[in-house]
Amino acid sequence: MDEQGLHSEGHGPPGHHIIPYKVYYLVFGGLIFLTITTVLVASLDLGLFSVPVALAIAIVKAALVVAFFMALKYDSRVNLLIFTIGLFFVAVFLGFTLLDTEFRGTFDKTKASTISEQQREMDKIQKRSDELGK
């Protein structure tokens, strides 16, 4: 450590990484290509795969922006870990949301009743089946 209490050279936080313009142009071209792909895919009827394909393209675009424009690729691995954990939880919450919307209306055939009413119905059904069985 030096007299200011800072880390000596090579042991402190990473410095600012200079990214060449060529990389920015390539990433920008990739984002334009993926945007055009998104528009083309949206015009297709992929049925059940529409949402997963759209999400996959969006994830790739977001990864390019985060990795290069926000320089996460050249940053500390701890920041990458934190970002990855955040993405994991976004995926979990999005998965629960998609499951919820996928199964809406599936269980509408049930009727609201108390447990005692349901037990009485079951007893009636059992009684009828016993009478038919004799």
Image (cartoon, rainbow, N blue to C red):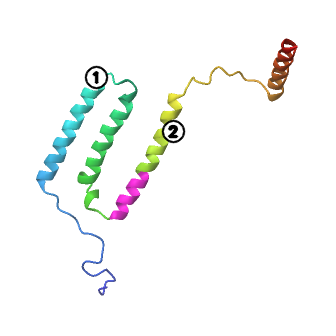
Residue at point 81%, 20% (across, down): 121
Q: Which residues are magenta?
A: 77-86
Q: Is residue 88 left or right of residue 105?
A: left
Residue at point 43%, 49% (across, down): 88
Residue at point 29%, 57% (across, down): 72
Residue at point 76%, 24% (across, down): 113
Which one is earlier in the sequence, the residue at label 1 or at label 2?
Answer: 1
**Residue 18 in magenta stretch:** no
C-alpha separation, residue under disc 1 versus residue under disc 2: 27 Å
Q: Position of residue 2 (x, y in %)?
A: 29, 86
Q: Which residue is farthest bottom?
A: 3
**Image mark count:** 2
Q: Position of residue 57 (x, y in %)?
A: 30, 38
Q: Secondary structure at mark 2?
A: helix
Instruction: Kindly identify which residue carries mark 1.
Output: 43
Mark 2 Cα shell of 10 Å, populated few (<14), some (14-19), many (≥20): few
Q: Position of residue 9 (x, y in %)?
A: 24, 79
Q: Which residue is farthest left?
A: 22
Q: Nearer the viewer, residue 123 or 31?
A: 123
The vertical placement of 7 against 18, above or below, is below
Q: Quadrant of residue 85?
A: bottom left
Q: Which mark is residue 1?
A: none
Instruction: Kindly identify which residue carries mark 2.
Output: 96
Q: Amino acid at mark 1?
A: Ser
**Residue 78 in magenta stretch:** yes
Q: Quadrant of residue 6?
A: bottom left
